[in-house]
Image: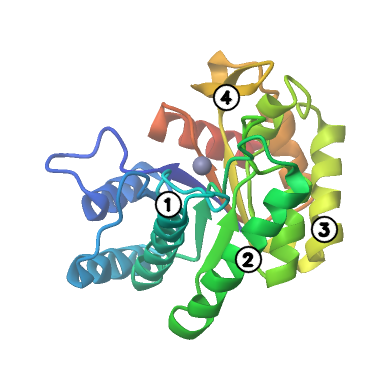
Amino acid sequence: MLHFAVAGVPRSTPRPGGTVEGLKHAHRLGITAMEIEWVQNVPKNPDRLKEIRETAGNLKMPLTVHAPYFVNLNSQDHAKLAASKMRVLTALSMAELAGARSVCVHAAFYTGMPPAQVYTNIYHATEEIMDKKKKLFPHVNLAYETMGKTAQFGTLEEVLAISKEFDIFPCIDPAHMHARTNGKVNTAAEWNEMLDTYEQYLGTKALKHMHLHFSGIAYGASGEKHHLPIQESDANWKDFLKVLKDRKIEGNLVSESPLLEEDTLLLKNTFERL
Ligand SMILES: [Zn+2]
């Protein structure tokens, strides 16, 4: 099954809000999954995480997590690199306690270095992260995201190559790919090619547990500017949904539009009517 996930607590959630109330409210709205937005910081209260896990479990809502933005696994500053690895590990460990299946991470910036060298640096950081992950929180997936700005590590090939090496799977954001290429990746042929590449790297079975993001997006020559409501963007979103349906893609597709629950439901309802 392909779940359409809301990116965080729906805006119409009754006060005082929070993830648990947000899950219940999303469920009432007909939404079947959530990505928990730990983009500023990661909660560490085990009781709270257990409550999230149990609520999502009872509602049969599969969870993903978005890790903090303040990560650069290519940092040349020793302290910053160590802090980045720690942030990824903390997000992974707490996500495992919350019962999430996958954690998306913005891996790094090139900071003027050749992409191959950046890849090697991220490879070494990932080795350390995966060493600990395998022992301490083996179930949750580390998903490096395809990124929208040309200064960021995260082409489709980069995130697939590194994921294959560690037997993990990336977070594919076709809106970011669209922005990064200044308007390409917006047709059925291109999305099919994207999924073909994904399948070549990770195998056919990997298409049954994907971690996807989607939204409208504003962009320029250096890529992403900001996310947009789907219907205010140039995304051929109905064609995209049709490709997902035709290829029987499964997993979680997170709607990252600023219209949280509205656009999640727009995508879900349109997909179901196809
Ligand atoms: Zn992201």
Give the mark, 4 or 3, whose residue is nearer the N terminus.
Answer: 3
Q: Which amino acid does label 4 sit on?
A: Gly
Determine which of the numbered discs, if any, sits on residue 124 in the image.
Answer: 2
Residue with the mark numbered 1: 80
Asked if the residue under mark 2 is in contact with the one under mark 1, i.e. CB atoms within 8 Å, the reply is: no
- Viewer-nearest residue: 161 or 29: 161
- Viewer-nearest residue: 58 or 71: 71
57 to the left or right of 149: left
Q: Which amino acid does label 1 sit on?
A: Lys
x and y percent of residue 156 in the render?
Answer: 74, 45
* Quadrant location, the N terminus: bottom right
Q: Does the residue labelled 4 lie within 8 Å of ligand 1?
A: no
- Viewer-nearest residue: 4 or 123: 123
Q: Distance between the residues labelled 1 and 2?
A: 15 Å
Residue with the mark numbered 3: 199
Local secondary structure at mark 3: helix
- The answer to whether residue 138 is visible is no
149 to the left or right of 161: left
Give the mark, 1 or 3, whose residue is nearer the N terminus.
Answer: 1
Asked if the residue under mark 4 is in contact with the one under mark 2, i.e. CB atoms within 8 Å, the reply is: no
